[in-house]
Image (cartoon, coloured by chain):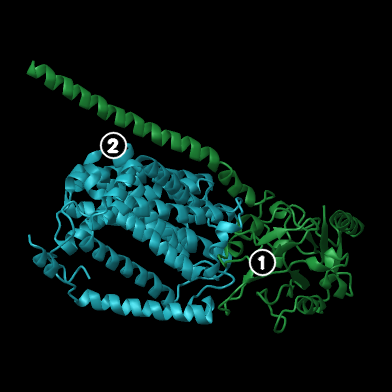
Chain colours: A cyan, B green
Amino acid sequence: MNSTATLASRRFRPGFWTAVFVVLFLAFVAVTVLRFTKGLGAVTNLSDQFPWGLWIGFDLLCGVGLAAGAFTLTAIVHLFNLKRFEPIVRPTLLTGFLGYGFVIVALLLDLGQPWRIWHAMVYWNPHSVMFEVAWCVMLYTTVLALEFSPIVFERFGFHAPARIIHKIITPLVVLGVILSTLHQSSLGTVYLIVPSKLHPLWYSPMLPLHFYISAIGAGIGMVILESYLSKRAFGRHLEMDLLEPLARGMVVALGIYGLMRIQAIYRNHAFGSILEFGYEGRMFLLEFVMGVILPVVLMSFRRLRTNPDWLVGGAFLAVMGFVMNRLNVSITGMEAASGIRYIPSAMEIIVSVGLVATGMAVFAFAVRTFPIFPEGPVTDSKGSDVGV
Amino acid sequence: MGMGLLIDATRCIGCGACSSACKEQNKLPGKVEEVLTAYTWTTVQEKEGLNVRHLCMHCEVPTCVSVCPVAALTKTPEGPVVYDRERCMGCRYCMMACPFEIPKYQWDSPVPVIGKCIMCAGRIKEGKNTACAEACQYGATTFGKKEDLIWEARTRIREKPGTYVNQIYGLTEAGGTSVMMLSNVPFDKLGMKTNLSTEPPAMRTWAVLSNIPNFVGVWGAFLFGIHWITARREDVAKADDHTNRRGDRS
């Protein structure tokens, strides 16, 4: 393969999805300008009754959770020494890094005065879960950047710094796993403070553990999904021999999580509110049956796990179940106590969708530029239009 | 024990002098609003034929103080829960967490801050009472040492047992508050939160947070241990492989 051919095929080819992305991005910029000139009230449906909305529920809680594949896979490869999973570590790290980037941008929009974000580093309050969250975001983003850096060094031929990272990879991975464990669980701890507000279908003293274990399940689901999307966009093959055992891990994580949720609901005497089939009950059933029970049952069958279509379907259900859970905890479960119904404004949705689109565009750019996949940078895309 | 306020709903006539005095004292813009906002820190609403004041309860173990990541909210020794607007970065966790739903936000401002009653902390430091207590002509809002106020409240209930509900609202709610209320109508009918535990919510998060140092040590040791075992296994397997091959050759 000569270099001119590589360059030619890597050239940017705008298509339908590129147009969609540009429109979304411009809308995102417009909302951002409005938000910083007119205040949060002008662009969001947030209010004194409902101070946290879609940007916390989706962008922050889901962005962090779906990045959980990164620490799970680095632990599997570097600590449990299952080296055969190595080929899928890099795309997972990239997703994790983008997930955290997503979270930081969302935070900068959601905070009332984001230019004071450094206050969290200076004015300490160790009693605050949010303080723990802030430090975890900062430190884990740094760790992810370091874990990812050899890929960039490799691309530009800097071997010395890559060797340094290689030498410290074990403590780095241990630090990453500790920080992720703290961060994933702390997002559940955030809601421990509202026993009188969060609906008993979701409130539990075990919330930190619920968040942690469900993030592992969904993080693995995300690894499978992202392999599938890469296949669609860049004509790559699905690494079924690696994804199938990962799906087994997902079943175990989601299974444990499902049992814990049932136990928590039993302890809260909240089965009644499922049977009542009211707003919360319906949302819970949708989340739990579709997003926990169904993927666990389906992925328990070897025949379905080894079929690429079913495998991707199961992973998709798990990820959707995870997203629904975070939205239910942060929005559905809080509505009754607030006395109002919160529905995100169009501009809030534009920001969230625009961020997802940006994340996908950056992913597509990164896999073309850096050796993310084992075969090196993606040079030829089968569906020329799909990869932005 | 600090200072506090005793609010007796049976004595309030709903004149709203407290709300106006609060606006003036804290230089809050606009008219007194129906409900609490970032610019109206105390309201009087008619409920069940009573006039009910609504304001920050100034918890003994304040949830807002515990959740603020930059320690912009603090409980002073005199009792008030005060707010440092220069520190706040606007995460709004205090609004989310407050069991009484008190902190309100400047949604209309590009440089927003929280607004809530600060129990006239500056006046109290100078040895004065709060502006609302000063303005009240009917003895519905009384300022004083919290222990004296509890005594006073118990005396009122004892002397008119048929009148008052036998409860001092704020004595145990969310671990107890510096602001306490009396009423002749059950408090849940007045829109007060009656589903609050006597344990401060902050205890629930602290139970987790205080264990983090332990957790980091144990989890870190465990993870390094796993790595040590798996790496050692690999080394042993390699060494075996090596000796086997040497054995073949000889």
Compared with A281, B235 (above or below) is above
Residue B243 placement: quadrant: top left
Q: What kind of residue is marked 1?
A: Ile
Q: What kind of residue is marked 2?
A: Asn
Residue for badge 1: B102
In the image, is A328 to the left or to the right of B84?
left
Q: Quadrant of the N terminus of chain A?
A: bottom left
Expressed as whole percent of the image width and height from the top left, the position of residue B154 reads 87, 55
Expressed as whole percent of the image width and height from the top left, the position of residue B46 reads 74, 75
Tell me what residue is drawn at x 44 percent, y 51 percent: A184
Q: Residue furthest top?
A: B250
Using the rendered image of the protein, determine whether residue A293 is visible from the camera's viewpoint.
yes
Residue for badge 2: A81
- Read off the chain for label 2: A
Q: Are circles 2 and 1 on residues that touch, CB within 8 Å?
A: no
Residue placed most toward the observer, A214 or A360: A360
